[in-house]
């Protein structure tokens, strides 16, 4: 494997790891996205009730936002420990352990559940402001277009510019979030760790590993394009998750060697 680049070597190891674990990996991904469909179903039910009670489109829209937005946030938070379990399942397999589907629900025990939600909320809070800043060019472009050039918003050129700005903004956010690349694996290693300390240690580790992490993440760009259809997603997402967890393993081990942990 000496002729392979580090990112290629990680992807090769991910494929080897998934060979015996593909079935639980796919089922794990399906469990992870299940709350998304539950939330859609709940929103559809609420919309059906609102349509019976309100005729005015403006009032209907306001009521939908007031009722559905908090509900979506609450359900998202309550289901979020599935993400922690999903990472745990793949990270333990990266440590040469058997992938167990039961790990998806590992953080639904009472104390672990609270800690997992706190970690997820901490991550969200740390990313929301940088996320808004990264997407400022897109917001400005769309606000200006709708307010000053309403006819332009119906053109293909407007959609193309919006898409390009969305991609560029997303890339900026991904680059920023690399500092937290190993937060979830660190949490898998030490559930009792102080949450702010996890973010601090992650930033310290990734200070010297961010370039490698960036190359690994963006090496999946062609694969992510396959996810425009549903079926490849069942392979690409588990494959990418396994590779990122293997990369996290090497980054954290490098952190130990440099006394960063």
Image (cartoon, grey):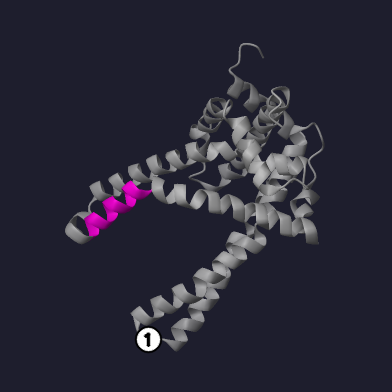
The image position of residue 97, as x and y in percent, is 82, 35
The single residue placed furthest to the bottom in the displayed view is 53
Q: Position of residue 144 (x, y in %)?
A: 23, 55
Is residue 137 one of those drawn in magenta? yes
Q: Is residue 52 above or below residue 144?
A: below
Using the image as rendered, state which of residue 208 and residue 178 is in the foreground: 208
Q: Over which residues does the magenta segment extend?
A: 135-146
Name the foreground residue: 78 vs 253. 253
Quadrant position of the C terminus in the picture: top right
* In this picture, residue 182 sits left or right of residue 47: right
Report helix, strand or loop for mark 1. loop
Whether residue 163 appears in magenta in the rendering, the answer is no
Residue at coordinates 72% horizontally, 44% vertically from top-left? 187
**The N terminus appears in which quarter of the rendering?**
top right
Residue 214 lies, in percent from the top left, at 52, 30
Q: Nearer the viewer, residue 112 or 87?
A: 112
Who's the residue at 55% across and 67% down the image? 72
Dividing the picture into quadrants, the one containing residue 75 is: bottom right
Q: Is residue 203 visible?
A: yes
Q: Is residue 144 above or below residue 188?
A: below
Q: Which residue is mark 1?
A: 55
Which residue does the image show at 50% across and 46% down from the upper left?
229
- Evaluate whether residue 27 shows in this view: no
Say whether residue 255 is left or right of residue 161.
Answer: right
Picture quadrant of residue 96: top right
Looking at the image, how many numbered discs can be counted on the residues? 1
Classified by dominant secondary structure, the portion drawn in magenta counts as: helix
Residue 70 placed where, x, y %? Answer: 53, 70
């Amino acid at each position: 494997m000496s002729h392979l680049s580090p990112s290629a070597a990680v992807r090769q190891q991910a494929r080897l790891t998934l060979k015996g674990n593909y079935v639980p990996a796919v089922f794990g991904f399906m469990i992870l996205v299940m709350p998304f469909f539950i939330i859609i179903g709940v929103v559809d039910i609420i919309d059906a009730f609102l349509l019976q009670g309100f005729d005015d489109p403006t009032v209907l829209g306001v009521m939908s936002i007031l009722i559905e937005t908090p509900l979506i946030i609450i359900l998202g938070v309550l289901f979020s420990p599935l993400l922690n379990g999903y990472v745990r399942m793949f990270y333990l397999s990266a440590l040469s352990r058997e992938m167990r589907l039961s790990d998806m629900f590992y953080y639904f025990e009472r104390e672990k559940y609270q800690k997992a939600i706190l970690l997820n909320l901490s991550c969200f809070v740390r990313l929301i402001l940088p996320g808004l800043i990264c997407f400022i060019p897109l917001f400005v472009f769309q606000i200006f277009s709708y307010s000053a050039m309403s006819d332009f918003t119906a053109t293909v050129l407007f959609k193309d510019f919006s898409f390009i700005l969305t991609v560029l903004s997303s890339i900026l956010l991904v680059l920023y979030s690399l500092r937290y690349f190993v937060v979830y694996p660190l949490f898998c290693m030490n559930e009792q760790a102080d949450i702010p300390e996890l973010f601090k240690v992650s930033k310290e580790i990734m200070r010297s590993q961010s370039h490698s992490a960036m190359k690994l993440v963006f090496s999946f760009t062609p694969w992510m394009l396959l996810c425009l259809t549903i079926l490849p997603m069942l392979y690409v997402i588990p494959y990418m998750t396994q590779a990122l967890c293997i990369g996290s393993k090497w980054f954290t081990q490098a952190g130990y060697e440099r006394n960063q942990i």
